[in-house]
Amino acid sequence: SLTQVDPDDLKARADSLFRGGQVEQAEKLYARVAEPIVAAAVAAKEEGNAAFKNDDMEGANAAYERAFRLINLDVSKYNYYADQAAAEYGRVMRRALPATLVFALYSNRAAVLLRLERYREAVDDATKALKEKPTDLKARLRRAAAFRAIGGFSNLASSATDYAYALQLQPTADLVHTLVEVWL
């Protein structure tokens, strides 16, 4: 039995198995590599959430960044590797992630970036969160607020569109009031 296995060695063995046509065995090794990485990413997300609750936006942002680095996001690039073994590892990693982790990281970081007044980055992260979960009210409202803060006609129009969509998800007087304010 192997007590201490270097993840890079394990991944290299899995890559070799995959290239040799032993896909099932490779996937099992990829999953073993992914497991501690995913656990560390989830822990970093929780650390970010705690920092946010303590009003430590820089600490929250750093923790979310660490989670993204651990899981090697940009996940959209997993399908574009020239090396099929790397693409397969990316697919296994994505499957190993808790279903809502990627969404939560983007949505939570959008909230942090809003508080840090980094509005364009907040729009980008909220948009990525909405690609993962299009009907999420919080991500929609975060993007709307960021567009509104940036200002200018097209951003205000985008903000109004997001507020109107949010109103369909959860009709409230506050949202109606905010939507009217955007257009005034």
Image (cartoon, rainbow, N blue to C red):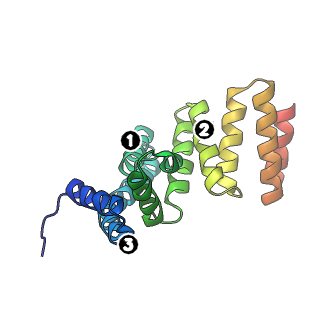
Disc 3 target residue: 24
Q: Give the label, 3 or 2, closer to the camera.
A: 3
Q: Which amino acid type is marked by label 3? A: Glu
Disc 2 target residue: 124
Residue at image location 43% in from the left, 58% down from the top:
88
Q: Find residue 53 and report its horizontal and vertical position in percent.
A: 46, 51
Pick whichever, 103 or 109, lies toward us. Answer: 103
Q: Find residue 118 and report its horizontal and vertical position in percent.
A: 55, 31
Seen in the picture, residue 180 relative to 167 is either above or below; the reply is above
Q: Find residue 18 and report its horizontal and vertical position in percent.
A: 35, 62
| Cα–Cα gap, marks 1 and 2 | 17 Å
Q: Give the label, 1 or 3, closer to the camera.
A: 3
Pick whichever, 39 or 143, lies toward us. Answer: 39
Seen in the picture, residue 7 relative to 158 is either above or below; the reply is below
Crowdedness near tag 3: few (<14), some (14–19) or many (≥20) residues, C-alpha within 10 Å: few
Badge 1 or badge 3: first in the primary sequence: 3
What mark, if any, has residue 111 been given in the picture?
A: none
